[in-house]
Amino acid sequence: MKQSRFWPLPTWMMGAFLAVSACQTSDNADFVAVYATVETVPVDAAVGDDAADDPAVWFNAEQPSESRILGSDKKRGLEVFHLDGTRDTTDAIGRINNIDVRLGFPTSTGPKGLVGGSHRDQVGLVFWSIDAQGIRRLRSTALKSQLEDVYGFCLYHSNGTFYAFVNSKTGDIEQWELTATGDSIDGKRVRTLHLGGQVEGMVADDALGTLFVGVEDEGIYRFDALPTGSSTGTLLEASTAENPAIAYDVEGLALFAPNDSTGYLVASSQGNNSYAVFERTGKHAYVGSFTVGDGTVDGTSETDGIEIAAFSFGESYPAGIFIAQDGANTDGTVSKPQNFKVVSWAEIAQALLAKKP
């Protein structure tokens, strides 16, 4: 999962999170509930297959309504959806586990969106470019990892240089520096990190130069994102089991970054089907939690990957969108293959504001 440079939100929406008390308990009744307005069509898998995993968003600045939702299918490849949830295209390239997007990647025909992912069949990294004309796979030399397996993935952009992070279930993390030549992409390993437990979810903060990594049964660690940074991570105290709102596993991570200094880190708390919100800066204090409940669209449970895009997508999503993988998708009482749910960020802000003590 996921962070790009976002547009500012109104002050009242920023204040919505700050108004939430940090004394909530792990009882989901104490979490605010929000509701998805859109769901993507299910991935092409059998009911009960653990297939859909990690969402991302490509923002079309020229026509925001023509932006795209992307989703990894860890049994089949990369899915691309319209904002209304209908399928645009599928690249059946193999087992893509986690994905991420950054804007402004240089190609022979100008800057485009860069989509990257962890390819478990190739035990390496794979990339695409995306613009209004569609998505196409970038040519590359074999970007093979030295990890036993590849699992989590995220991108990072700093001072014109693009990086990719990829990890394994053993807690090892590689950082790659990416280079572009025409419509090809290459990379070199520039750093390795290690954590003691199973990791997957990662997100990098471009503006503040930080990398967040989730250890599934421990909490979230923060690292310097630049390859010259320290290889020692700092555990976010509010993300551990000491916080009663957290129920392991800690899975997907995403950033709400409306500007270069304020915002929030959001984590999927898989054990209680909720999403925990932390301050983006400082000691990353816990702010509150929300769930995605059953409404016109069914809610979410057992969520793996999440994404936040704080662009204005028009009237339906004026402050951005929150996307969550649904591990147990249903249509009424009928079970369906997994998919992704889309929630208006404005609704999340309003719901948390209503919880103001």
Image: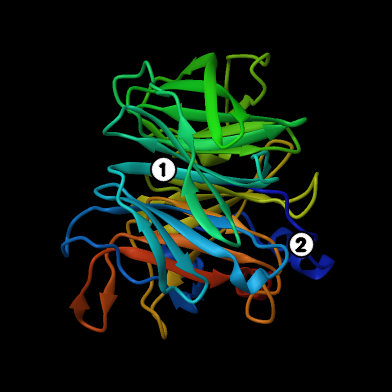
* Residue 57 relative to residue 122: left or right: right
| Label 1 SS | strand
- Image height of 312 relative to 218, above or below: below
- Most foreground residue, 219 or 209: 209
- Image height of 143 relative to 146, above or below: below
Closer to the eye: label 1 or 2: 1
- Most foreground residue, 229 or 112: 112
Quarter of the view holding residue 258: bottom right
- Most foreground residue, 54 or 35: 54
Mark 1 crowd level (few <14, some 14–19, many ≥20, 10 Å Cα): many
Task: Tell me, yes or no, whether the two marked residues, 1 and 2, touch with CB atoms within 8 Å.
Answer: no
Position of residue 88 measured from the top left corner of the image (x, y, whole percent): 43, 67
- Image height of 100 relative to 89, above or below: above
Q: Calculate the distance from the C-alpha at mark 1 to the C-alpha at mark 2.
A: 29 Å
Q: Residue at x 30, y 51 (%)?
A: 92
Which residue is most to the right?
A: 11
Mark 2 crowd level (few <14, some 14–19, many ≥20, 10 Å Cα): some
- Most foreground residue, 166 or 27: 166
Q: Earlier in the sequence, mark 1 or mark 2?
A: 2
Residue bearing the label numbered 1 = 98
Q: The residue under label 2 is which amino acid type?
A: Met
Count the labels in the image. Answer: 2
Q: Residue at x 82, y 68 (%)?
A: 10
Quarter of the view holding residue 143: top left
Mark number for residue 14?
2
- Image height of 121 relative to 348, above or below: above
Q: Residue at x 53, y 22 (%)?
A: 187
Q: Quadrant of the C terminus?
A: bottom right
* Residue 214 relative to residue 237: left or right: left
* Residue 264 relative to residue 70: left or right: right
Q: The residue under label 1 is which amino acid type?
A: Asn
Position of residue 55 measured from the top left corner of the image (x, y, whole percent): 46, 54
